[in-house]
Amino acid sequence: MSKQSFLCVGGAALAGAAFLMLAGIPYGVSSPSNVRNIVLSPLFWPYVLAGILAFGGAGLVLTAFRLPPGARDERLSDVPGGWARLGAIAVIMLAYVMTISTLGMVWTSIVAIVAVAFLMQAKRPLLTAVVAVAAPLLLYAFFAHVAGVGVPQGELVRLP
């Protein structure tokens, strides 16, 4: 990528993180004042994600200044099958959002992880399958049973 691309994407990430931290999260996420554990506060994780976005944006901006002059900018059209994969990931994301109400977040996440791994042609399919099943189930177990946060359940299958 060129210096201009790194600066543009990094600047957009920094602007997005600033918007989230200054307006989006304070005015868009409500939180009760009596939350004892900060990790369980509805404000905590959005701020963590906004901080990660800001950190990544700053990294891209700093990388732009370390690039040698005349670095080649690789476009999506230069990558074989790039547009088809971009369209496929958009379809997977749309299907994920639309299927959560029917199957629930855990089962939909398992299917989505497998679909994305297939799209990316994962080099270790067995490990990918194990992670695709284990990660959503472990996250469900933590949030539902340890943190006491409701995870969206589907109409067809319900987890304990």
Image: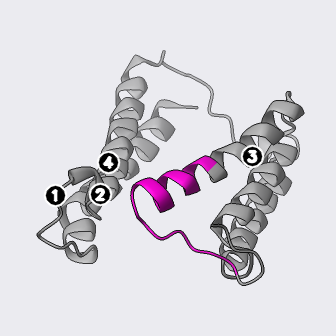
Which callout, 2 or 4, points at the residue further toward the start of the chain?
A: 2
Q: How is the model colour-coded?
A: one colour
Alpha carbon distance from label 2 to label 4: 12 Å
Residue at image location 27% in from the left, 69% down from the top: 24
User: For the residues carrying marks 3 and 2, which lies nearer the camera in this image?
Assistant: 2
Residue placed most toward the observer, 110 or 123:
110
Residue neighbourhood size for the residue with mark 3, other residues' Cα within 10 Å, grouped as few (<14), some (14–19), many (≥20): many
Across and down, in percent, residue 16 comes to: 34, 57
Residue placed most toward the observer, 23 or 86:
23
Alpha carbon distance from label 4 to label 3: 24 Å
Which residues lie in the magenta part?
138-154
Which callout, 1 or 3, points at the residue further toward the start of the chain?
A: 1
Q: Quadrant of residue 56?
A: top left
Alpha carbon distance from label 1 to label 3: 33 Å
- Three-letter amino acid code at disc 4? Val
Alpha carbon distance from label 1 to label 2: 8 Å
Across and down, in percent, residue 96 comes to: 71, 69
Residue at image location 27% in from the left, 73% down from the top: 29
What residue does disc 4 label? Answer: 48
Q: Is residue 80 left or right of residue 2?
A: right
Which callout, 4 or 3, points at the residue further toward the start of the chain?
A: 4
